Image (tube, grey):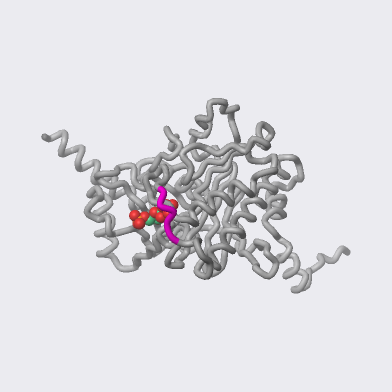
Amino acid sequence: MVDSYQPLDHELALDRDCTTLSRHVFQQLQNFGPDAQDLSALMNRIALAGKLVARRLSRAGLMEGVLGFTGEVNVQGETVKKMDVYANEVFISVFKQSGLVCRLASEEMEKPYYIPENCPIGRYTLVYDPIDGSSNIDININVGSIFAIRQQQSEDLDGSASDLLQSGRQQIAAGYILYGPSTMLVYSIGKGVHAFTLDPSLGEFILSNENIQTPEHGPIYSVNEGNFWQWDEGIRDYIRYMHRHEGYTARYSGALVGDFHRILFQGGVFLYPGTVKKPEGKLRLLYESAPLAFLAEQAGGRASTGTHDILDVIPEKLHQRTPLIVGSREDVALVESFIQERSREQASVAVKA
Ligand code: FBP
């Protein structure tokens, strides 16, 4: 009679302490083939980037020249923070001499950066937002890094990265790093969403939450209501509904990663709608919205432009922006219903006119 062996508590704790990111990727893929080796190594390098950025942020207030602006303006037309530049370079540096990533595209660079020694063997492209929530950096409130891994589909000889202009369903993996009270890395390779917490004593990201599921509905709505008068009537109607109904509460940190992290675990919805002046909104599709949409769907939630799933949107340019509504299935559908209701009304008014 074979006894089913029950591991002792300390053995369980030890096993948990040994579940690092690179090991977890192998566990997910159930093989040690070349693709698994590459993806595990890729995630390990992203983890290193997260540790380097976390270390800099944790001591930023004590160091000269870490906080504040560079005086430059980036391709988005935004003033650049010194931490934006540092973090952008960190992600490039960790992939040098890796043979993994041939090309990196980020919010801080007009054109993709090529790592010649990795091309052509490096079959992957990393798209990333090195520091998300830049307005929070200098006042020590949480910020994040967002990333997605895509397959390099062509030689890209003209450097236009046109093969990157594919829907979010082409992402192989996606995730973010949250620099908060603790540093966490949340990722998915299409087999559920999992969170790791950086254990500073080990210098390792250790598995802390596996197979995260976003509740179907949540009480939180997260939006910058300061833009209320710039929104279409559909979004205004939704916010009026929130104000008039019990059971809802507003939370907005100014950093997409932090707001999304709360909703991933507790449910609810984050929205950054388009405005009358900027119908395409503020957030970027390739390296902000599509990676979080990948995670949201993997956790049982949804991500929408208001009329289409974010993961079905095919970008026309690298730094394309998109309205974003992401979170619990029911709450995203509720926002969409207000948008569609208003556009139906406007259509019927147009017909009568
Ligand atoms: P950055 O990546 O440049 O920081 O921009 C994105 C962002 O900061 C999001 O993290 C956040 O949700 C949003 O912009 C805040 O915008 P606003 O200040 O208009 O509410």
Q: Residue at x 72, y 50 (%)?
A: 26
Image position, residue 132 (x, y; %): 46, 54
- Predominant SS of the magenta segment: strand
- Can you tell me which quadrant of the image ligand 1 is in? bottom left
Q: How many marks?
A: 0
Decide if residue 254 is on the left or right side of residue 41: left
Residue 172 sits above or below residue 82 on the image: above
Q: Which image quarter holds the C terminus? A: top left
Residue 18 sits above or below residue 40 on the image: below
Q: Residue at x 47, y 64 (%)?
A: 142
Decide if residue 4 is on the left or right side of residue 338: right
Seen from this angle, which residue lies furthest right?
A: 1
In this view, the residue in front, 259 or 287, is 287
Image-quadrant location for residue 328: bottom left
Decide if residue 205 is on the left or right side of residue 140: right
In this view, the residue in front, 203 or 77, is 77
User: What segment is highlighted magenta in the picture?
Assistant: 68-72
71 drawn magenta = yes
Seen from this angle, which residue lies furthest left?
A: 353
Image position, residue 81 (x, y; %): 44, 55
Q: Which image quarter holds the N terminus? A: bottom right
Is residue 167 at all visible to an observer of this figure? yes
Image position, residue 225 (x, y; %): 29, 59
Image position, residue 331 (x, y; %): 38, 55
